[in-house]
Image (tube, grey):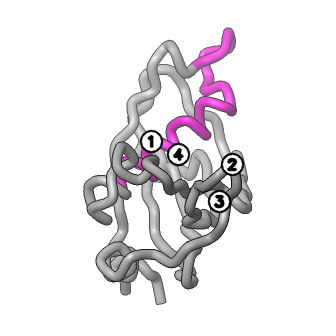
């Protein structure tokens, strides 16, 4: 069984709509923060280095908004890897508050080189690939 990358997230006023629940695009920002932290803390590939001639655009994203998150809630965001390709990866994510799921889904990222305004897939480096493999769920 692979590792699970987790981070806590407190719902702040800036995340909420007039009803006091998280406005759905804020969840995508929170998800991106989770991925950015994972790349820096666990994969050794911080975005400040990644975005010099490379990128990891989202190729596919599936999200289920299961239950609302409210101002002041502190939920746990988790990430695991379900598939690792030559230049792509698919990860699963879940945001949970206490014993209830708030949000869950799956996302595929593709590692690309940026040259002359073109995106071309390129293989993960050996070190990044090894670090990603630690999070694959069997």
Q: Residue 78 lies in magenta, yes or no?
A: no
The range drawn in magenta is: 16-38
Dot 2 surroundings within 10 Å: few (below 14), some, or many (20 or more)?
few
Is tag 3's residue or tag 2's residue first in the polypeptide sequence?
3
Mark linked to residue 105 = 3
Q: Single out the residue that lies furthest toward the bottom.
A: 138
Q: Position of residue 111 (x, y in %)?
A: 55, 66
Front tag of 4 and 3: 4
- At x 54%, y 26%, the residue is 70
Q: Is residue 81 visible?
A: yes
Is tag 4's residue or tag 2's residue first in the polypeptide sequence?
4
Tag 2 residue: 117
- At x 44%, y 30%, the residue is 73
Do the residues under discs 4 and 2 have CB atoms within 8 angstroms?
A: no
| Quarter-of-image position of residue 28 | top right
Front tag of 4 and 2: 2
Is tag 4's residue or tag 3's residue first in the polypeptide sequence?
4
Is tag 2's residue or tag 1's residue first in the polypeptide sequence?
1
Of residues 9 and 81, the one drawn nearer to the viewer in this rendering: 81
Q: Position of residue 68 (x, y in %)?
A: 63, 35
Mark linked to residue 33 = 1
Of residues 86 and 26, the one drawn nearer to the viewer in this rendering: 86
The residues tagged by marks 3 and 1 sit, at their Cα atoms, a distance apart of 15 Å
Do the residues under discs 1 and 4 have CB atoms within 8 angstroms?
A: yes
- At x 65%, y 59%, the residue is 105
117 on left or right of 6:
right
Tag 4 residue: 31
137 on left or right of 105:
left
Is tag 3's residue or tag 1's residue first in the polypeptide sequence?
1
Quarter the N terminus occupies: bottom left
Front tag of 3 and 1: 1
């Amino acid at each position: 069984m692979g590792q699970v990358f987790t981070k806590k997230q407190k719902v702040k006023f800036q995340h909420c709509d007039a009803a006091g629940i998280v406005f759905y695009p804020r969840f995508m920002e929170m998800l991106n923060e989770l991925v950015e932290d994972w790349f820096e803390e666990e994969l050794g590939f911080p975005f400040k280095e990644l975005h010099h001639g490379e990128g990891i655009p989202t190729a596919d994203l599936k999200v289920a908004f299961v239950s609302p998150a409210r101002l002041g809630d502190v939920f746990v965001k988790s990430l695991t890897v379900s598939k690792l390709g030559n230049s792509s990866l698919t990860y699963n994510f879940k945001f949970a508050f206490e014993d209830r799921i708030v949000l869950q889904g799956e996302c595929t990222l593709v590692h690309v080189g940026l040259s002359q305004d073109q995106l071309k897939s390129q293989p993960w480096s050996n070190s990044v690939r090894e670090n990603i493999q630690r999070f694959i769920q069997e």
